[in-house]
Image: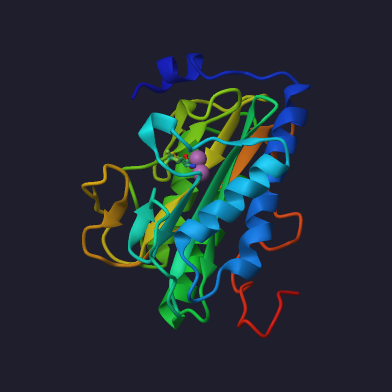
Amino acid sequence: MDGGTDARRINIYALEDFAGMRAAGRLAAEALDMIVPHVQPGITTAALDRLCHQFVLDHGATPAPLNYRGYPKSICTSINHVVCHGIPGERRLEEGDILNIDVTVILNGWHGDTSRMFVAGTPSTRARKLLDVTHEALMRGVRAVRPGATLGDIGHVIQAFVESQRFSVVRDFCGHGIGRRFHEPPNVLHFGRPGEGPVLRPGMFFTIEPMVNAGRPEVKVLDDGWTAVTRDRSLSAQFEHMVGVTEDGCEVFTYSPAGLHKPPYTSAPTRQPA
Ligand code: MF3
Ligand code: CO
Ligand code: CO
């Protein structure tokens, strides 16, 4: 991957395009806020998919994953050792499961892509630490985004933090440019070296979405062609934000309007989230 040629293919969007991304990112984040009270032991991932699908349609948007390169559902649900791209189905959540829910909407031609971790009931201490570290890694990456920084700077801060906590960064999947298209240049790696890769400029839109494993970084894709799992079956976590580079830093398009950025925000059936 030559940083130079990659950089020349990165779209520079106009100031007025930020409004479209703001709306799309907000809707995707609102879908995740909506699903919070439903993530409970006993629900199927297919039911979570139906709820998100309907929510997106009700708000005048379409779910980008549905039929994307043959993907069969509207969201991805990745439980425990599933790294990403888990396909919703009849699997019921069990007490202590951790899962990533990844929503991408298309609203007025703009893509809004975000994911968070959820827990069914109460997570183990180790799972809780994995979620905290993964969220902090994402936010350290976000804080590195500004004009003149490079993609390598972002990857480096994420990798350095994750490895300092004795977890590992998945190498096989990365963040991506986004806007009028779901996936466009550049690839946003979650590892790297300071100063390497394309230089960030105002008007670039991309996701940061580190996948962090409690064990080794290697993954494999199951026979369904989508579901990526850790080879050592260790737990995996991921959070995803979509950002736009501004003159003095970045705008995060996918913050939770309800402030539900990371667990614990699920609850026993008797307790509602704050
Ligand atoms: N939303 C995922 C991402 O963050 C992509 C899912 S592609 C799908 O890039 F086809 F699996 F939906
Ligand atoms: Co993405
Ligand atoms: Co996503």
Instruction: Work out whether residue 17 or residue 31 is closer to the camera in this orientation and state it.
Output: 31
Is residue 159 something one can see in this rendering? yes
Q: Quadrant of residue 48?
A: bottom right
Instruction: Work out whether residue 12 or residue 16 is closer to the camera in this orientation and state it.
Output: 16
Rendered position, 183 above or below 92:
above
| Colour convention of the picture | rainbow
> Relative to 78, is 244 on the left or the right?
right
Rendered position, 232 above or below 123:
above
Q: Which quadrant would the C terminus be assigned to in this image?
A: bottom right
Is residue 132 something one can see in this rendering? no
Q: How many marks?
A: 0
> Residue 237 in the image: x percent, y percent?
43, 61
> Relative to 163, is 274 on the left or the right?
right
> Residue 248 in the image: x percent, y percent?
74, 34
> Relative to 219, is 128 on the left or the right?
right
> Relative to 172, is 205 on the left or the right?
right
Residue in the picture at 41% in, 57% down: 78
> Residue 182 in the image: x percent, y percent?
52, 30
> Residue 162 in the image: x percent, y percent?
43, 60
Q: Which quadrant would the N terminus be assigned to in this image?
A: top left
Rendered position, 199 above or below 34:
above
Residue in the picture at 63% in, 65% down: 36
Q: Quadrant of residue 269?
A: bottom right
Residue in the picture at 49% in, 14% down: 8
Residue in the picture at 41% in, 64% down: 164
